Image (cartoon, grey):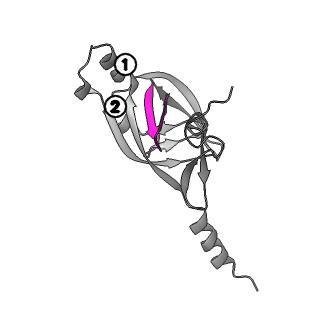
Amino acid sequence: MINIDRNLSQISKNMGAVRVNVKLTNAIDEGLVNRGLLKPNLVRVYEAEAVINTGAVRTAIPVEVCEQLGLRIRSQEIAKYADGRQETVGVTGPMIIEMEGRETIEAAMVLGDIVLIGQTVLETLDLLVDCKNQRLVPNPENPERAVLRV
């Protein structure tokens, strides 16, 4: 007889959430620094543990993070959840996302209470999810740096 509870428990241990440290930077601030219009110590930055969600297309940040970074809401878009629910959410101006020694610039949806990294960032950074070991790894074909697919 198979013990279903034990098997589900083992699967849960092996397939837990992948979490990574991430640094988010207001890209407009950084641009102003590069143009000599803002002092470097005034660039707004937020560091946190983020959850990787391969089922999400876009990145999402809580409203508090959006406010701390001073990101402008540039548009309102419809977000569709896995359970079928939909809601209108704000989409930010650009932010720099740094993780695993790589960085990209992307807008984010403003929702939820955690920083959630979606598929577009993973694709751009050429990172793969190792669910068994609960970590991100560089694409073995491009271990040194991200390669963008055209």
Alpha carbons under labels 2 and 1: distance apart? 14 Å
Let me know if residue 67 is in the magenta part. no
Write the start and end of the magenta stretch as one range: 93-113
Q: How many marks?
A: 2
Please state which amino acid type lies under the numbered disc 2.
Leu
Specify the quadrant that holds the N terminus.
bottom right
- Residue found 64% across the figure and 72% down from its top: 8
The circle on residue 31 is 1
Residue drawn at (40%, 24%), measured in percent from left and top? 27
For the C terminus, which image quadrant? top right
* Residue 50 image offset from top left, x and y in percent: 45, 47
Nearest to the observer: residue 12 or residue 67: 12
Give the farthest residue toward the bottom: 1
List x then y, in percent, for residue 16: 56, 61
Q: Is label 2 in contact with label 1 (beta carbons under 8 Å)?
A: no
Residue 88 vertical position relative to residue 128 in the rendered view, above or below: above
Q: Which circle marks residue 69 in the picture?
A: 2
For the residue carrying disc 1, how many other residues have a C-alpha within 10 Å: few (<14), some (14-19), or many (20+)? few
Q: Amino acid at mark 1?
A: Gly
Q: Position of residue 115 (x, y in %)?
A: 45, 43
**Number of other residues with Cα within 10 Å of mark 2, as a class: few under 14, some 14 to 19, many 20 or more:** some
Task: Check disc 2 and report its element: helix, strand or loop.
Answer: helix
Q: Nearer the viewer, residue 118 or 121?
A: 121
Return the mark for residue 137. Answer: none
Q: From the viewer's perspective, is residue 59 above or below residue 5? A: above
Q: Earlier in the sequence, mark 2 or mark 1?
A: 1
Instruction: Quadrant for residue 33, please give it.
Output: top left
* Residue 141 coordinates in the image, percent (x, y): 66, 42
